[in-house]
């Protein structure tokens, strides 16, 4: 029988996930209604070893390859996309901080990673902080800090006036610079405002962290140039695992999670059409149009999964052969991620037509899957309106120059 679930593969990571997935599924509906994720969901992932997936081997991590991680992210997304979204944020900074540990690590970084304290963050570049001698005074509103209520630390970017201490004063960008800071969320100068009220992913706690006059040693900040460091041939990255661009790994996590949630929606819709009858008592699956919708959705899911699989295979090959990524590979990564998300959205549209009005009841999981998927698919890394510009810049480089 055809299945929408990922191709069967056995791995220690997937095997350890099984108990956590049961808990995530059991908590999903209540978490969505409450707008809060139980701390037990993240603890279950920790017990399953998920905090080690992207951690450096030098820090007792797994450096799990992309194909195996994609299958794991798809499984988590199928169980509960809100949990996948929060842990994707945590995993992103586990990966980034592990990479940073290869060079000039933050104080306490090794302990934070080894003790698996959740680190959330936001990509926003927030003004309002200043350097005062050997201290950075952090102030500002940090939006979209997914999972901040369950995290202990936040890694974010701040815009600081004046030249960076690490660069010559005559540097062209000396009027201001961007720094990456590590903020202890338990400090009294830090609070979280509940600002997230999205249509979907309601339990992700994508709220705003407010920091007011937090004084930190300058050592708790770094010049925010991880991408530049990674591409600088003068610096030898100890592991090919960290030569992959972080944004590409983040997009892969999101894409696989969305495909997992769409797979769960498919399973529900397929079974619902087999068991549901219309007003005349005829089985819904008896109607060719309903069967066609389910078949079209299946084809779209196969497409999304194939695109994600191709990205993972290419990434793993680069890691195994220590091959650098190229501008062409960058364009392909952006394009494949957006195309995968669009295939997932088309699948959801077909499934909604198949289940009809009765299938969208709030008492059933299908409408939560649809809301979560639609909310997740507008993410900047896979949003086609944003990705199109990046791909066009690669195809027409002379016209993309300012």
Image (cartoon, grey):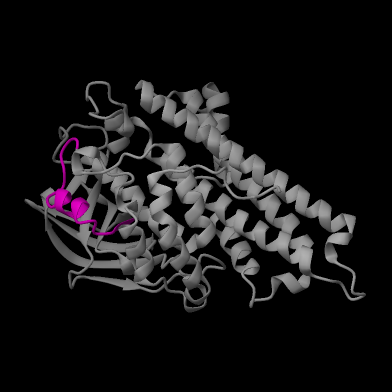
Q: Considering depth in this image, is 249 or 392 the residue closer to the camera? A: 249
Q: Is residue 358 left or right of residue 166?
A: right
Magenta segment includes 147: no
Q: In front here: 28 or 326? A: 28
Query: How far across and down, in percent of the image, does residue 244 sit?
Result: 37, 32
Q: Report whether residue 163 is seen.
A: no
What's the magenta region? 102-121
Quarter of the rendering containing residue 36? bottom left
Q: Quadrant of residue 225?
A: top left
| Residue at image point 42% right, 65% down | 206
Image location (x, y in percent) of residue 224: 26, 42
Residue 145, percent from left and from top: 37, 61
**Which residue sits at x=76%, y=54%?**
294
Q: Is residue 17 above or below residue 151?
A: above
> Does the magenta-highlighted stretch encompass residue 116?
yes
Please indicate, yes or no, whether residue 309 appears anywhere in the rendered image. Answer: yes
Residue 233 lies, in percent from the top left, at 27, 21
Farthest residue, direction right: 280
- Looking at this view, is 362 or 74 the one in front? 74
Report the side of 324 relative to 119 (left or right).
right
Quadrant of the rendered image containing residue 195: bottom left
């Amino acid at each position: 029988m055809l299945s929408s679930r990922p191709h069967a593969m056995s791995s220690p990571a997937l095997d350890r996930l099984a108990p956590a997935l049961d808990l995530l599924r059991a908590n999903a509906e209540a978490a969505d209604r409450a707008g809060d994720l139980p701390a037990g969901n993240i603890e279950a992932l920790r017990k399953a070893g998920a905090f080690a997936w992207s951690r450096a081997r030098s820090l007792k991590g797994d450096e799990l390859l992309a194909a195996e991680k994609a299958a794991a992210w798809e499984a988590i997304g199928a169980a509960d996309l809100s949990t996948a979204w929060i842990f994707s944020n945590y995993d992103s900074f586990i990966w980034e901080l592990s990479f940073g540990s290869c060079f000039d690590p933050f104080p306490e970084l090794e302990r934070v990673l080894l003790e698996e304290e959740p680190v959330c963050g936001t990509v926003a570049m927030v003004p309002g902080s200043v350097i005062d001698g050997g201290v950075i005074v952090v102030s500002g509103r940090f939006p979209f800090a997914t999972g901040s209520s369950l995290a202990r630390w936040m890694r974010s970017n701040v815009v600081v006036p004046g030249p960076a201490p690490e660069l010559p004063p005559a540097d062209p960008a000396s009027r201001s610079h961007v720094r990456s800071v590590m903020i202890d969320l338990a400090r009294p100068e830090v609070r979280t405002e509940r600002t997230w009220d999205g249509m979907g992913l309601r339990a992700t706690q994508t709220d705003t962290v407010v920091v007011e006059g937090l004084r930190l040693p300058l050592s708790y900040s770094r010049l925010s140039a991880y991408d530049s460091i990674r591409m600088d041939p003068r610096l030898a990255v100890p592991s090919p695992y960290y030569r992959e661009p972080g944004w590409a790994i983040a997009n892969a996590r999101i894409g696989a999670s969305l495909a997992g949630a769409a797979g769960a929606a498919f399973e529900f819709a397929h079974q619902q059409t087999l068991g549901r009858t219309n007003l005349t008592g005829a089985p819904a699956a008896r109607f060719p149009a309903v069967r066609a919708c389910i078949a079209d959705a299946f084809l779209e899911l196969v497409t999304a999964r194939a695109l994600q699989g191709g990205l993972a295979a290419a990434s793993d090959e680069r890691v195994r052969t220590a091959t650098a990524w190229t501008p062409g590979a960058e364009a392909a990564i952006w394009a494949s991620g957006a195309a995968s998300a669009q295939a997932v959205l088309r699948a959801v549209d077909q499934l909604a037509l198949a289940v009809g009005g009765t299938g969208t009841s709030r008492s059933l999981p299908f409408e939560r899957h649809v809301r979560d998927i639609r909310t997740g698919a507008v993410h900047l890394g896979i949003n086609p309106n944003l990705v199109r510009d990046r791909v066009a810049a690669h195809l027409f480089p002379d016209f993309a120059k300012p």
